[in-house]
Image: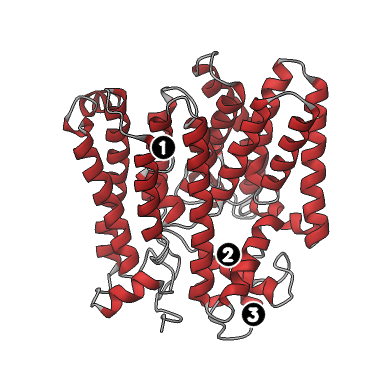
Amino acid sequence: MGKLIKILSSSLLTRPKVAITLSGLGLGGVAFIGLCGTNYATIPVLLPLTALAKRLGAPDLSDDVTNLIMFPAVLLCCLGLAGLLWANSKGWNPSPRRVFWTAVTVIAVCVNITPVGSSDTGSYAAYGRIAALGHDPYVFTPVDLPPHNPYTALVGTLWHATPSVYGPVATWTQLFAALVGGSKPWATIWMLLIFNAIAFALAGYLLLRTAANPVRAGLLWVANPLLIEQLVLGGHLDTYVALAGIVAILISRRGASVWHDVATGIVVGIAGGIKVSAVFVALGIAIPLVRERAWRRLARTGFVALVTTTALYAVSYGLHAIRPLFGASTMVISPSVWRSVQLGFDHVYRAHPSVTSHVFGYLWPPLTLALAWYLYKRLSPDVPAALAATCALTFAWVIVAPWSLPWYASVAWVALALLPRNSLTRWLTLVTGALALLHFSGLHPANTPTEPIP
């Protein structure tokens, strides 16, 4: 891999026009899949540009054709990103604002295309609809909706009977989108994509204003073709965690007063109210405070964060909303090393199937911390500790966790964008790209539109 990277880093790929072209082709290929929805890689709903493309004769794609387009498209996104970063390291220094607004233009187009890569946006919409109907999405599942409900048809077949594992802040966002969308699932999905894109762009704007190298920060986040493919075209709410995470880190670095600690704790608590992965942001902020023995600051920030998250759960649906997380913590995804071990154990010990999933639940957290420590030590001691720790912890989690998907790396990417050049960039690109190649199914056995746009 080192030899390949060395060859590519001195090839035509480092020319800005080549890198931009490859990035455009990669995103164009993924967007084409969305425009030809619904298919193997999308959910069964038509958004505005997809509906227009269908009226203009966009073809239906078979599983084989979808794969033939998606695999090279994701690879082109990875190569395009690598080329952009190499070009920047060799002196290419475009206007940061031009990079930002060009990316925002691309994002504005992407939110009008049917989501590509997973069925998560369908689940978000269904949980929002459940909440809008007055039910509890942490108990009531998509399959419990009335028969032939168009929202249930959006949910991947594996998740029909699964309650929400997202925090109350995420649920409120889904509820608002569902109130706007009403009985029209496409409108709910559209609202969710728009909200998500705004969060993605806001994080990019913060990086633009605070990064020592705003061009590199822009290329690593808002203009990153791999992240646009995963977070914008995929519509994953991990974008919100990344936005809240970088806001919390920036506040914690801005000052050491009581008010800075309280504000940091509140934002971390809000992030915890979106998704449990916010715990890595909390740990990343805590590490420099422990190193400095700033025990009062650590206690204040931690207490406020805990109270905020607890209050968000308590005032919304109750603390029972945390219960689905315990079931999710023992899940093992395929393909992965953990899944191979699980299958082997289940084959030998047929009387106790899947007992390994519970064992894995105890194994992966300490392994994640060990790998995070190794990655953290590989970074320069001069870099901001909160950023380095958050990046290392999230990256290690993506590698080690039995259930890992490419969009889980969002917090690692947003933290990496504020760090100086380092070796983690190439490995994060490789890991995110590899996971993206392994996981881009809409999880629908027969993708037919539930409700086209009139």
Q: Residue at x 54, y 39 (%)?
A: 411
- Residue 170 or 408: which is nearer the viewer? 170
The crowding category of the residue bearing disc 2, from other C-alpha atoms within 10 Å (few below 14, some 14 to 19, many at least 20), is: many
Q: Amino acid at mark 2?
A: Tyr
Which quarter of the figure has residue 448? bottom left
Q: At numbered mark 3, what does the secondary structure look like: helix, strand or loop?
A: loop
- Where residue 171 appears, as percent x and y from the top left, is 67, 61
Q: Which quadrant is the C terminus positioned in?
A: bottom left
- Where residue 138 appears, as percent x and y from the top left, is 72, 64
Q: Which residue is mark 2?
A: 124
- Residue 85 or 156: which is nearer the viewer? 85
Which callout, 2 or 1, points to the residue nearer the camera? 1
- Where residue 279 appears, as percent x and y from the top left, is 67, 39
Q: Amino acid at mark 1?
A: Gly
Q: Which residue is mark 1?
A: 218
> CA–CA distance between discs 3 and 1?
42 Å
Q: Which residue is mark 3?
A: 145
